[in-house]
Image: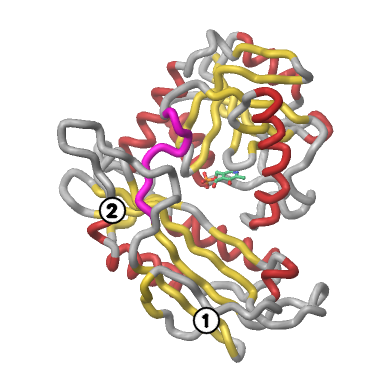
Amino acid sequence: MATAPSTMEPVRPAFGTVLAEQMAVAVYRDGKWQPHELRATGTIPMHPGAHVLHYASTCFEGFKAYRWADGSINVFRMDRHIERMRQSARSLVLPEPDAAQLAAMVRATIDANRAAVPEAPGALYLRPLLIGTTPNIGAAATPATEAMLIVLVSPVWDYFAGGAKPLRILVDDVNTRSAAHTGRVKTGGNYAAALGPTLEARRRFKTDQVLFCPGGEVQETGAANFVLIRDKRLLTRSLDSSFLHGVTRDSLLTLARDEGFTVEERVFKVPEMLEWAKAGEAALSGTAAVLAGVGTLVYREQEYTVGNGQIGPITQALRAKLVAIQQGRVSDRHGWIRRV
Ligand SMILES: Cc1ncc(COP(=O)(O)O)c(C=O)c1O
């Protein structure tokens, strides 16, 4: 990996742009998953009629392995992410990855790329990908019977370029980022739907992300969940099929409860969010973002400063607590860590 001379800050590649050398690949054929193999990260053979290229039969996961100070490598909430991948596959009627095989593929890929796992504050981002490969261009209403499961890994640092800077978020109560029943599925189509509105918002309002609030109900951004914090209370949307059930969200809610916060999981609307934000904190939660503070909300061409416009102290404290567990500096009371 490229680093500048030792007297300077290391040059860190943008999130996800550098892939480690080895990947694991397994094929689903004749009604079962075949044994996986490790290969050099590179191109895969793909028929132009492949189901995924026409009917978007694809889902993926994103989670991280951390190199601790003692040199060991530890994965955060691997079981949860594998379960979410299996849930996504079921929703899309794709062959479901076997949990034990996918865990073995993740372990094998980390093992093959040990030298590429950065020290803190970096991590190795783990990206399992499942695609339907059956060549059939008349299969809009027919599921793929052949599939490929790939585990890619990438050394990562900050997701939001600029690091710990308060985010500027457009509140969008017109567009949706997914069909109502596929919001909780981690599938490429949802990201494709969010991209246009996100770029348009960046162009018009210089915002970092769009907070989707279809029908005025606060949901999530294109790549992270959304939480409000005030007076020892934490508010976030209750789980339903309309948005991704973030593992970071679940972890932060658990830590907040441990700290004596009252956690409210319910549907809430834009005016209530703007009211909370006046004297509270807002943040985006996700594997990549961890917990990123929001400084400004832009709604119907008007700007609303969140608290004093800076990253809030509770946001910083919760983030620090989660990162300390992930990096092995605080003991893992909840059984979230798997050593590889
Ligand atoms: C749309 C969306 N929502 C929420 C999240 C947060 O999920 P997690 O905390 O499991 O990374 C992500 C990130 O992966 C995401 O892409």
Residue 27, which numbered label? 1
In this orientation, which residue lies closer to the viewer: 31 or 40?
A: 40
Residue 97 vertical position relative to residue 210 in the rendered view, above or below: below
Q: Residue at x 52, y 41 (%)?
A: 250
Task: Check residue 31 for magenta coloring.
Answer: no
Picture quarter with the C terminus: bottom left
User: CA gap, disc 2 to disc 1?
Assistant: 26 Å
Q: Residue at x 50, y 24 (%)?
A: 293
- Give the residue number, with chain letter if any, for mark 2: 117
The kind of residue tagged 2 is Val
Percent coordinates x, y for residue 28 in the rendering: 56, 82
Q: Is residue 13 left or right of residue 330?
A: right
Q: Quadrant of ligand 1?
A: top right
- Tell me the colour scheme of the image: secondary structure
The local crowd at label 2, few if under 14, some if 14 to 19, many if 20 or more residues have their Cα within 10 Å, is many
The kind of residue tagged 1 is Val
Could you tell me which secondary element the residue under label 1 belongs to?
Answer: strand
Could you tell me which secondary element the residue under label 2 belongs to?
Answer: loop
Q: Is mark 1 within 8 Å of ligand 1?
A: no
Percent coordinates x, y for residue 258 in the rendering: 43, 31
**Bounds of the magenta span?**
154-162
